[in-house]
Image (tube, helix red, strand yellow):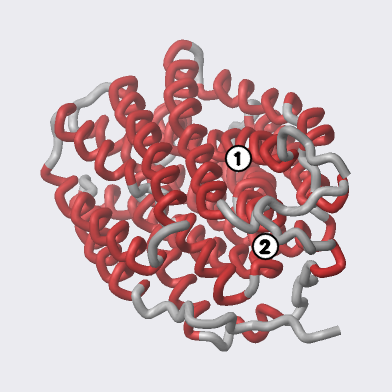
Amino acid sequence: MTKPRLFSGWIVVATTAAVLLLAAGVRSAPGVFVIPIEKEMGWPRSAVAGAAAFGILVFGITAPFGGRLMDRFGPRRIVLAGLMLIAASMTSSVMMTQLWQLNLLWGALSGVGTGLIGAVLGATVATRWFVTKRGMVSGLFGAATSAGQLVFVRGLTSVAENSSWRGATSLLAALPILFIVPVILWLIDDPSKIGQKPYGAPEDWHPSHKPAADVGVMRRALRSGTFWLLAGTFFVCGFTSNGLIGTHFIPYAVGCGIGADTAANTLAIMGLFNFVGTLASGWLTDRHDPRRLLLIYYVLRGVSLIVLPFVTDPIGLTTFAILFGLDYIATVPPTIKLCAESFGAQNVGMVYGFVFCAHQVGAAAASWLGGVAYDAVGNYVAAFVVAGFIAMAAGLAALGVNRSRVLVVVPAR
């Protein structure tokens, strides 16, 4: 068979990255719309943040099921279902007038749609299509998520200020429809479907040699200390990143006297450096112990969060955005690698789905508690400082992950 000039997996990677960018943009919207919705509806910030937290939680709960469905049916059909749910939730949100509708549409429906797409799609594609360069590809997918924040936060803020948050939501309703045809054409489920093998696979690789997903993997993983360390540290990752900062950074900056437009620009800068940091993390993950990388990432994150309450001017917040952005989701490539090493690459969709669920539970808790803390004392000082110390503890805990052997082995058939 003639070797193709371009490995088809790179086209799949590009399509996946575009879908992840969209999912990240939809998930970033609540942080942009907290103040506009609060002003228009007269709802307390804790109620609006609570709806955002519900969406994050549903996003995480959906992840294991999305991972299992992708392992069984392939990514393409699951992504198409997710796109349709996102379109439906955003279209309905334009007409929203009640708080229960905010929770239903931004929470439940949007959470399921983005959870099917944004949770385990990258991990599934990276492990199906690549034997070598998985860390780099995982970093690229993390960078796409960062780009979603970079592009959408700034764009949605501009539309919301010049029109309304409903106008910005209308834009989010239209975009998923545009992705349907590219996904059908280019998001190929598996290299064997087109007579190829994964990138870096040995010459004698054959589809029949590919291990099947282990249906009992989670039963054994839940008895493993390694799984709980991965889930626990990723809980903290979600708590300290998109839960706390993703939801409350713009409101915090506005409370410091900075305009919403400037705050959105600062968050976009964070997204830009997140793009750089996640790509670099993927490269480093292919070359260094992922546990030590996690230690560095979490400690740096913790220090930056502890310092944040004392930073109130635009220059200081921009500096924070740069430093925090470099490891915002840089934790993803080493966490995925540890999941694959410990539980088998063929089980990543399921195992990482549950680990990611813990991430989103942490994010939901921080999103809601951040709003509660603000309503209680009128500032975010306690929320940021406590989160900082928790992050540093997670870095130390990551060193305890056992990567010496595959803990769950698929039984011979």
The amino acid beneath tag 2 is Gly
Q: Quadrant of the C terminus?
A: bottom right
Q: Residue furthest top?
A: 162
Q: Nearer the viewer, residue 240 or 134?
A: 134
The answer to the question of whether label 1 and label 2 lie on touching residues, with beta carbons closer than 8 A, is: no
404 versus 107 height, above or below = below
Residue 354 tag number: none
Q: Which residue is mark 1?
A: 20
The amino acid beneath tag 1 is Leu
Neighbourhood count class around disc 2 (C-alpha, 10 Å): few under 14, some 14–19, many 20 upward: many
Secondary structure beneath dot 2 equals: helix
Question: Residue 347's image quarter?
Answer: bottom right
Residue 349 tag number: 2
105 versus 281 height, above or below = above
Q: Nearer the viewer, residue 220 or 403?
A: 403
Specify whether residue 120 is in view.
no
Horizontal and vertical percent position of residue 102 = 58, 41
The residue shown at (84%, 62%) is 207
